[in-house]
Amino acid sequence: MKAKKLINSFNYAFQGIIYTLRTQKNMRIHVSIATIVLIMSLFFRLNRWEMMILFVTITMVIACEMINTAVEATVDLLTDQYNIFAKIAKNVAAGAVLVTSINAVIIGYLLFAAHLNPASQQVIYAIRESDVHITFIVFIVVTVLIIGIKVYFGKGTPLSGGMPSGHAALAFSAATAISLITANILVSGLSLFLALLVSQSRVEGKIHNLLEVLVGAILGILMTTIIFQLLVS
């Protein structure tokens, strides 16, 4: 029961994210920009602290937009007539989003401007020396893509059911990344075996059908392979 409650809690949280993505244009813009920025970070030698600052900044903007949406929904629930305090609540919440967005632009400029270098050879070298960084970004891109597709189809929950299978996508994405990074056939084979087990469990548990799992697996493999081929090879 505790495990089920925990899963439900995650589902409710993801449903909140999906609702904001589905109904708020600004949220979709924030997520799109964040995805582009994360992909761009592959071309720069950001250290651990700089990556932490980048992720905290992105999280602040997205979380603030979600709080703004919650405030608007609460105000609309309490009154459907003009009220000066309702206006103040909405304006302040929108102002908070604006402040965090401006802050994100400034931090993005400071982080990336410091690493701009006309020497393309150094950029390429930095990419090839950051396999772990690339893998992490791949997982984020695949996750965002999965959520976007689930929003489009509007079926199932973020962690259960729907097209495509997010578990299969991430499992095969991880297996593909491991296979591309390591030259050990045994490690690659074991990672693929684990990805197959994850997919099989989704079908056996009747959480996804075979097509949803297959699409998720193909999506994870293709996205990971494309990003690695573009940025590493």
Image (spheres, rainbow, N blue to C red):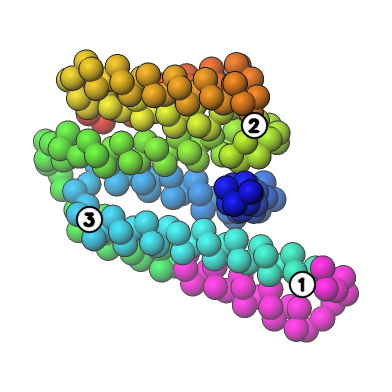
Among the two numbered marks 1 and 2 on one chain, the one whose residue lies closer to the N terminus: 1
Mark 1 falls on what kind of element? helix
Q: Which of 111 and 13 is in front in this view?
A: 13
Q: Mark 1 highlights which residue?
A: 75
**Circle 2 Cα neighbour tier, 10 Å, few/some/many (<14 / 14–19 / ≥20):** many
Dot 3: few (<14), some (14–19), or many (≥20) neighbours within 10 Å?
few
Q: Position of residue 233 (x, y in %)?
A: 21, 23
Q: Nearer the viewer, mark 1 or mark 2?
A: 2
Left or right side of 184 for 91: right
* Residue at 37% from the left image edge and 48% from the top image edge: 37
Q: Is residue 171 left or right of residue 191?
A: right
Q: Residue furthest front?
A: 1
Which percent across, then down, holds residue 208? Answer: 62, 25
Q: Do the residues labelled 1 and 3 touch (CB within 8 Å)?
A: no
Residue occupying image coordinates x 53% and y 69%: 98
Per the image, label 2 sits on a secondary structure element best described as loop
Residue 139 showing in the rendered view:
yes
Q: Which residue is drawn at 28% across and 27% down?
A: 178
Residues at discs 3 and 2 in contact (Cβ within 8 Å): no
Q: Which amino acid does label 3 sit on?
A: Arg
Tell me the quarter of the picture where residue 206 sits. top right
> Secondary structure beneath disc 3?
helix
Q: Which mark is residue 161?
A: 2
Q: Which amino acid does label 1 sit on?
A: Val
> What main secondary structure does the magenta stretch of the protein show?
helix
Q: Name the residue under label 3.
A: 48
Amino acid on which disc 2 is placed: Gly
Magenta residues, start to end: 77-101
Q: Earlier in the sequence, mark 3 or mark 2?
A: 3
> Neighbour class for label 1 at 10 Å: few (<14), some, many (≥20)?
some
Q: Rounded to the nearest whole Å, what is the CA distance between mark 3 and mark 2?
A: 35 Å
Q: Does the magenta stretch include residue 64?
A: no
